Amino acid sequence: MRKIPEPGPAMLARKYSVTMNRNSLSPSRREILKNVVDKDALLCSLNERIDREVMEKAGPKLKVISTLSTGYDHIDIKEAKKRRIQVTFTGEVLSEATADLTFALILAVSRKVVLADNYVRQKKWKVGWAPDLFLGSNVYGKTLGLIGAGRIGRAVAQRARGFDMNILYHNRRRLEKKLEYDMRARYVEMDTILRESDFLSIHANLNNESKYMINESKLKRMKNTAYLINTSRGQLVDEMSLIKALKNNWIAGAALDVFESEPLTASSPLIRMENVVLLPHIGSATYQVRSKMSEIAAQNIIEILEGRKTPYLVN
C-alpha cells in the first residue's frame, strides 16, 4: 500500500507484515507489480489501476482488495469476482465533506472568490470599494440542478435550502416521495435540468453508461449564465467539450475538483481561464474524513482475513 493517514497503517502493522510505499505519491506500475506478489491483501486508492495483470501477479493468496475510496471504478470487479477476491470500499463516510466542498465551489465560482483573492495578493488593489469590481452572480434564490441524488447529492440539496434555492434533480431512478420531500427537490428529465439550472452539480457514479454524460450537445442546452460544478469523477465530463463551451460562452463558468486525467496537465487551457475554479481532487480532504477512511479500509482487510463480514463489500 501507499503512505496513508493513520490509524489504518498502525492497525494493520499490529497484525500483519506490511509492505508500504513510504511516499505519499502513487507507486509506479512496476512497483505495484513487484510488491503485490504473494500478498494476502492489497490496500489501494483511486490512482492505482488494479486489473487482471495485478491480480495475476499477486497470485492465489490474494483474498481482499481494499480501496481507500468510495468509488471503485479503478478495480476490475469482474476479474476479482472470477478469482474469488473480495473488494471493499469506504462507504459514504465522505458525503458531508464533499457536499461542503461542492457548495464552496458554487460560491467561489459565482462570486469570483479566487480571482479577488489573487487580486489582493498580487497587490493590484489600488482603490477601496468600487461599484464594478469583481461583479459576480447571485446564489441565493437561484436554481440548483443535481445530476445524481445519492448521499452526496442529497447533502448538497440540504445546504442549498439555506440559500432558498429551487432544487431540481435527475437520477437513474426517481427517489421515493419522502426523500424528495426531505430534499425539497423536484425530479425532472435531463433536458429540463440542463435548460433550467443556474448551477448544475454532478454527483453520479462513473460507469460505461455515464462516461462523458456531459458532452457538447448537453453543454449547448445549458443557460449561458449557468455554472457547471463537478466533485464526482472527471470522466463524467467531456473535457474538450467543456473547454469549447467556456471559450464560446455557452456557459458562464465551471468549478472542478476532478478531471479526465489527474493531475491536470500544465498545458490544459482550463488553467488559463478566469471563469474556472480548479482544485486538486480534495473533496474528502479533511483530517476527520481521511482518518475515518483509513480506519475503514484497514478494518475491511482485517475482517476479511479473519473470516468475518464487512458492510463495505463491493462484490
Image (spheres, helix red, strand yellow):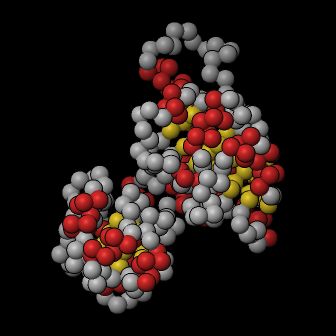
Determine the residue positioned at 29% across, 51% down: 25
Question: From the viewer's perspective, is residue 196 above or below residue 1?
Answer: above
| Front residue of 127 and 20 | 20
In this view, the residue farthest toward the bottom is 307
User: x, y percentage for residue 28?
Assistant: 27, 56
| Quadrant in the picture for the N terminus | bottom left
- Name the side, left or right, on which 314 lies relative to 43: right
Q: Is residue 145 above or below residue 115?
A: below
Horizontal arrangement in the rendering, residue 169 relative to residue 294 (left or right) = right
Q: How many marks?
A: 0
User: Looking at this view, is 83 or 88 the one in front?
Assistant: 83
Question: Residue farthest to the top?
Answer: 126
Where is residue 299, by image quadrant?
bottom left
Look at the image and tell me whether residue 245 can be seen.
yes
Specify whether residue 301 is in view.
Answer: no
In the figure, is residue 237 to the left or right of 296? right
Classify 306 as above or below 139.
Answer: below
Residue at image position (52%, 67%) is 92
Question: How far across and how far down the image is residue 112, in percent?
Answer: 59, 29
Q: Position of residue 233 (x, y in %)?
A: 54, 54
Q: In terms of image quadrants, where is residue 123?
A: top left
- Depth check, front residue: 131 or 31: 31
> Which residue corresponds to the image point at 54% horizontal and 58% vertical from the top-left?
96
Viewer-closest of 283 and 139? 283
Occupied quadrant, residue 14 = bottom left
Q: What's the residue at 68%, 29% (across, down)?
A: 248
